[in-house]
Amino acid sequence: MKSLRVTAPGTVELLDIARPAAGPRDVLVKVRACGICGTDVFYTHIGGLPHQRYDIPLGHEAAGEVVEIGADVSGVSVGDHVVVNPMANADGIIGNGGVQGALSELLVLPDAKPGVHFRVIPDDIPWEVAALNEPMAVAFHGVNRSGTGAGTKVVIFGAGPIGLGAAVASKSNGADHVVVVDVVANRLEKARLIGADGVVNSAEEDVIERLKELHGQVPGPVGRPPRPDTDVYLDAAGVPAVIETALKGLKHGAVLTIVGVHNKPVEIDLRDILPSEPDIRLAMGYPTEIFEVTESIIADWRKYRHLISDIVPFAEAERAIRLASVPGATDKVVVVFD
């Protein structure tokens, strides 16, 4: 079968590898769609993983069709559509240092159990949308970490796939008003399409003043101006300016949750923010959310479809990696299989 592999720094190739087989406790999945993640781009750039170089399988955002089931496996049938938990495989994390990558024609799930290794989904969900399950679990975990709930007012910085997913998750968790901030107009339009209550173009508007208009305002610390009455600030952009803006705006006891990956250290003046007693949290991965988010995708898959900017056939998977490598050129790139 064909599998997309990192073969040198900056180089990926579709290689012929041995077709996997399912044992008595395994499930064999024909991959039908796989999203491109920033880690796929990073591994391509450096030529693999820090501890594992070259011939590295890529892809972990998988949705597919069950084509073979071991005799000891229950809870699934041949032909079922499934989303996959890449973290659960016994042979290593799929597409992140494990033996297998989901940018391959087939995946074997060893010792497969429904609700642990895979989740069956309705047949009417398009494959490219189903492949959003894994990154949306990341977004939902960030929102769960933030404490967003009924009646909260939320601002999300970054209208890429994770930020937009966080907007959907915030509304699902009962947020009263969700604002999305970005500098790209078409991304802000997508935020409106997926249900954001307000958007702010930070290249054109003062974010803090606009939040005061949208969320109201409360007194600031002694001797300082009023602050927006915003409960949760969520950084899905991973740029220092977001942290700087959020810390200037946090009301007393507000929460700043950081989901975006910061590639450089960010300076925080703890003395300056002490009077506001903010709660700063970080979020990574999805300890419980990988299949919790599936219900939201099943219910609102047409809304999630707006997150996808490019659909690329598997035969052109190398192009998909190149597309995703250009900052700002795309949103979510998804590879689809015949």
Image (spheres, rainbow, N blue to C red):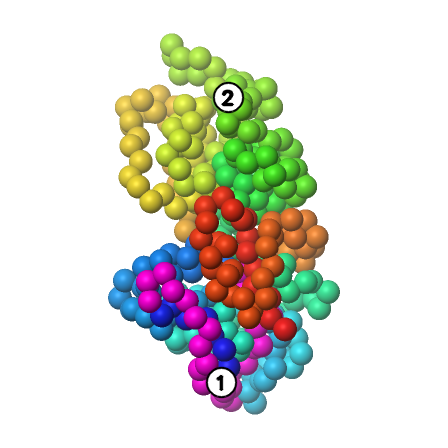
Ranked by sequence position, the earlier of labels 2 and 1 is 1
The residue identified by callout 2 is 206
Q: Residues within 10 Å of mark 1 (few under 14, many from 20)?
A: few
The one of 50 and 179 positioned closer to us in this rendering: 50
Q: Which disc number belongs to residue 318?
A: none
The residue identified by callout 1 is 19
Q: Position of residue 266 (x, y in %)?
A: 31, 36
What segment is highlighted magenta in the picture?
Answer: 8-35
- The residue shown at (55%, 81%) is 28
Mark 1 falls on what kind of element?
A: loop
- The residue shown at (62%, 61%) is 128
| Whether residue 130 is situated above or below residue 238 in the rendered picture | below
Q: Quadrant of residue 299?
A: bottom right
| Whether residue 252 is situated above or below residue 105 in the rendered picture | above
Whether pointer 2 and pointer 1 mark residues with C-beta atoms closer than 8 Å, the reply is no
Q: Residues within 10 Å of mark 2 (few under 14, many from 20)?
A: few
The one of 129 and 221 positioned closer to us in this rendering: 129
